[in-house]
Each structure stands twice: as structure tokens, then as C-alpha cells.
Amino acid sequence: MPKVLISDKMDPKAAQIFRERGVEVDEITGKTKEELIAIIGDYDGLAIRSSTKVTKDVLAAATKLKVVGRAGIGVDNVDIPAASAAGVVVMNTPFGNSITTAEHAIALMFALARQLPEADASTQAGKWEKNRFMGVELTSKTLGLIGAGNIGSIVADRALGLRMKVVAFDPFLTPERAIELGVEKVDLDTLLARADFITLHTPLTEQTRNILSAENLAKTKKGVRIINCARGGLIDEAALKAGLDSGHIAGAALDVFAEEPAKDSPLFNTPNFISTPHLGASTTEAQVNVAIQVAEQMADFLVSGGVTNALNMPSLSAEEAPKLKPYMALAEKLGSLVGQLAHGSISGISVEAEGAAAELNMKPITGAVLAGFMRVHSDTVNMVNAPFLAKERGLDVREVRHDREGDYHTLVRVSVATRDGERSVAGTLFGNAAPRLVELFGIKVEADLAGHMLYIVNEDAPGFIGRLGSTLGEAGVNIGTFHLGRRAAGGEAVLLLSVDSALDESLLAKVRQLPGVKTAMALAF
Ligand SMILES: NC(=O)C1=CN([C@@H]2O[C@H](COP(=O)(O)OP(=O)(O)OC[C@H]3O[C@@H](n4cnc5c(N)ncnc54)[C@H](O)[C@@H]3O)[C@@H](O)[C@H]2O)C=CC1
Ligand SMILES: O=C(O)CCC(=O)C(=O)O
């Protein structure tokens, strides 16, 4: 039974769903990195929010880990390249907390406009400072939206409902989508110059880090109010403090900080500064949504191989997974076969689908081919890290679907480009379930690729099979199955034998000395 660790506080629905789906679950929150490293080796899955940092060191200790599930959106607390290299799928729940976070941004905008936290503190201190707290109306003001994705779009919708004008800067926002949202697409400088309120809704990336730098803050309108419910690191906090102190910036509300937990920021106690402790997603509704979603996604993956909302692997629905499973087994065997047989530097690999296979989602099939191909050189390769490693090695990967009718109802062909030209193998599924090799380097041969095998290329001549049988028999090697294919009588023949035990080098050397043998290799599946 797969085992998952929930390492951040999560709605109890998550644990309930894991158990209902046949996944064992431990909830151990508040661990230090060292404590997490000490226990992570026991788990197949890790369910987190934003506190757990899934670093290289944690992943190195996570020897059984297959999936990290983020109950939320931002995955900047997960080292995704390291997870990909380790073959660990990283999933998030991209929609479960968007409305809640957008509402928090709007709440902070109102709080800034009317200085609500300070007015509340002053009133409860018995001061009744009616004349101190003069606010501004939101109606007719311009809201500058940096990032118009899921959350930004909801913020825009709510702001338009408040009769604000919304200008948006997002390099990926199309003019059509801007019209649909009712926002004006502008460049960053225009937004900075025109906005009365600025709200940030981008992930933290190398392009967005410090997007509100000292230089950009200086381009804002005097009296601007700034809200950040996305990620710390998007704003230069020192420059923000200077802007608030000088009065250029009329107010700022941060839900997120460059260093979290933020326990001692220079911004604290600055007039017109509001902060919340990364509460953007903290509503009952959002937490139930993300807990249910992350547990369902992770359980689907661990139990049936379904992949949803993965950031480092193509999606594969729980319905598709059973249909694709035998294809992935076939693809992995074909990838492994070409990986074992093709020598020298390989510059490209192509995966072709014919018949029923051409109707399927090819990404998982290609991932399985690459995993089989590269596992020949490293046993830590799997479906997740194989495409990543292929790219790292500069392997040109092609996918081709054919709509032609072939000899088989379904066929997957894998070809590699070698120095000696293209080498290709093909396989089908018998009964839609059993992987079977049907073509090897242009020769028709029908074989089950399983266990220990012996591959021989020889000149087709009488007496060869008897001599080979004797050589193996004398070495105590039992033949399981025997598959023969040849280009033409008396031409080049290919033999694939399954044997009950591993073949050692000395036996292979004897086989290579038999008359007519051109190649003899041990294979393993
Ligand atoms: N405070 C909190 O508790 C929460 C914070 N978040 C944060 O909110 C962020 C946004 O979430 P979603 O809207 O769901 O993500 P999303 O991926 O739907 O939208 C992000 C938008 O940012 C845009 N973008 C990317 N690079 C940009 C750039 N250089 N300049 C301007 N725009 C750029 C993208 O085109 C995209 O439209 C998340 O990445 C997460 O870090 C999300 C949920 C809760
Ligand atoms: O889990 C949380 O409370 C934070 C949510 C968040 O930042 C996100 O979903 O990106």
C-alpha cells in the first residue's frame, strides 16, 4: 500500500480521502528540514502547503518518493528541476484557492483605502480619532493588475464590479482575452504611471523577481497604494519602506514577504502599512478545495497512475491510465531494446504510432520509450525524469502519428538515429494487453521481451540452431522461448531467445565463436 506524508497543516478531508483510496497516511507537521530528511525515506508521496521546503537535500533522502502534491498554487518551495531529475512528479491544485486569494487582495485594497487596521486599533484604544482617518473611494480609480492569470482575472472582475478601471500588464495576455476580461492591456511603465492601486498576481520567477524595484516604484503615481498577495520577492521591500516613509506611496498591504515567516521586517509599524501572515488562501472553502484536490490527484497517481496538474510531466487522466498502461509497458520495452542494441552516439529518437495507438495521448508513450531507452544507462531513470534527461543530453525526440492501415491493429515503432543510419524496432499489443515485439531492425520477428534474453545475428545456414542449443546446454543454460526471423532464406537471420538465467561473458564469447555468428548480446527486460 502506498504511503503518504502530510507535512503541513491541511484540512482533515485530505487524510480521509487518502485512506478511502487505499493510501496509508501520516500527518506530521512542523518538522525541521533535518527531521523531515530523517523520515522522508519511508514515503511514496509528500503532501505540502507552503511551509515545507522540498529542497535537493530532502529529495536526495526521499528514496521511495514518487510524488509531491502542493495543496495550493505556488510551487516555489519545491525544487522542481531537482524533483524532475529524481523522477518525482510535482503536482499543484491550480484553481482551488484562486477566488479566496483574489478576495484577500480586494479586502486589502479596501483596508488600504480606508486605513481600517489603524482605525480599528485607534478606536479600540479609546481615541475616537474621527478626523485622522480620511479615506479614498475606489469607484473610478484605476487598478493596475500585474499578472492577469487565474487570480488576476478574478480580481479584475471584482474590481470592475466596484466600478474601477482596470489596466493590466501581463506579457501572455492576448488582446482578445483582455477584451473578454474588460481590462486595458498596457505595458509596465504605463501601468506604473496610471494606477491608483497596484496589485500583483504573478508567480515568482527570474522575470518577475523585483518587478516592483526601486526604479519601478519611482515611476508610480504619487499616492499609489500597493497590494501583494502573490509572492514576496516581487517587491523591493526596502524601496517600498522608503516610498512609504517619503509619502510617495500612500499605502501598502503585503500578505507575502521575501523572507517567511516574516517576524521582524523594517516595514512593521510603518504608517499606512498593512500585513497579513500569508493568509491569501486561508479560508475554510479554499482549504477544503485544495485538500480534496491534492489528495485525489496524489491517490490517483499512486494507485492507478493517473496524472493531473503535474508541473513536470504530461497529464494522464485516471480513465486514460488503464488504457495506456499496456502501451507504456510496450513502449518501455521497445525503448529498452533499442537502448541495449544501438551502439555509439545517438542523436535522435522517434516514436511512431499506427492504428489504435495513433488515437491515444502520445506523451506518456514517448515518456515510457525514453525511460526504457535511458534506463539502460541509469536505473534511476523513470517517466518523469526521462524527458528532462533526454533534453539535457540534446536528444532530438519526435512523435509521429500515422493514419495509414498497417498489418497490426495497433503498432508502436521506435527508431533511433545512429552513426550507421536509422535503427528501428516495432511492437504491438496482443489482445490489447500483451506487449509483443514484431519487427527488429527491418526483420519480422515475433517475441515477448521479458527476463534474460540472448540476441544473435547470424548467417542463415543449416545446423546453426543445433550447435547453439548444445553450447547453451553445456553451460547449463535452459532456453525458455525461441524466436527466429530472417530477411531471406540463406541471408541474415536474427535470433531472440529467452533464457532462464543471466548469460555471462565467457558463454557469450563461445557463442560468438560459432560459425556464422555476427553478433551475440545478452539483453535484460
Ligand atoms: N497569498 C497566497 O496565499 C497565494 C498566493 N498565490 C500566488 O499567486 C500567484 C498567481 O496565481 P494564479 O493567478 O493562479 O497563477 P496563473 O499562472 O494563473 O497566473 C499568473 C499570471 O502571471 C503572468 N506572468 C508571468 N510572468 C509575468 C511577468 N513577467 N509580468 C507580468 N505577468 C506575468 C502569467 O502570464 C499569468 O497570466 C501564484 O503564482 C502564487 O504564487 C496563489 C494562491 C495563494
Ligand atoms: O497554502 C497556503 O496557505 C498558501 C497558498 C499559496 O501561497 C499558494 O497556493 O500559492
Image (cartoon, helix red, strand yellow):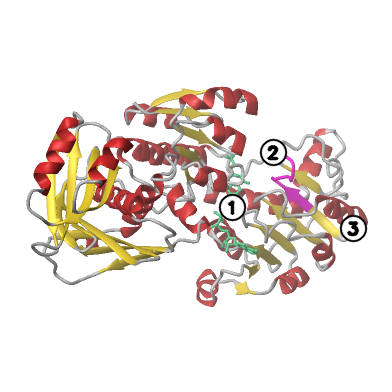
Report which residue position mark 1 lands on.
102
Label 2 belongs to which residue?
277
Disc 3 vs disc 2: which is toward the camera? 2
Left or right: 209, with 460 as reference point:
right
For mark 3, what is the residue? 247
- Locate residue 423, reporting x and y percent: 30, 63
Q: In the image, is residue 197 part of the stretch drawn in magenta?
A: no
Q: How many other residues sit within 10 Å of disc 1, few (<14), some (14-19) or many (≥20)?
A: many
Front-lying residue, 440 or 344: 344
**423, 228: nearer the viewer:** 423
Q: Which amino acid is tagged 2?
A: Pro
Q: Quadrant of ligand 2?
A: top right
In the rendered image, which quarter is residue 267 located in? top right
Give the amino acid at mark 1: Ala
> Where does the magenta region start and end?
252-260
The quarter of the rendered structure image containing the C terminus is top left
Q: Dot 3: few (<14), some (14–19), or many (≥20) neighbours within 10 Å?
A: some
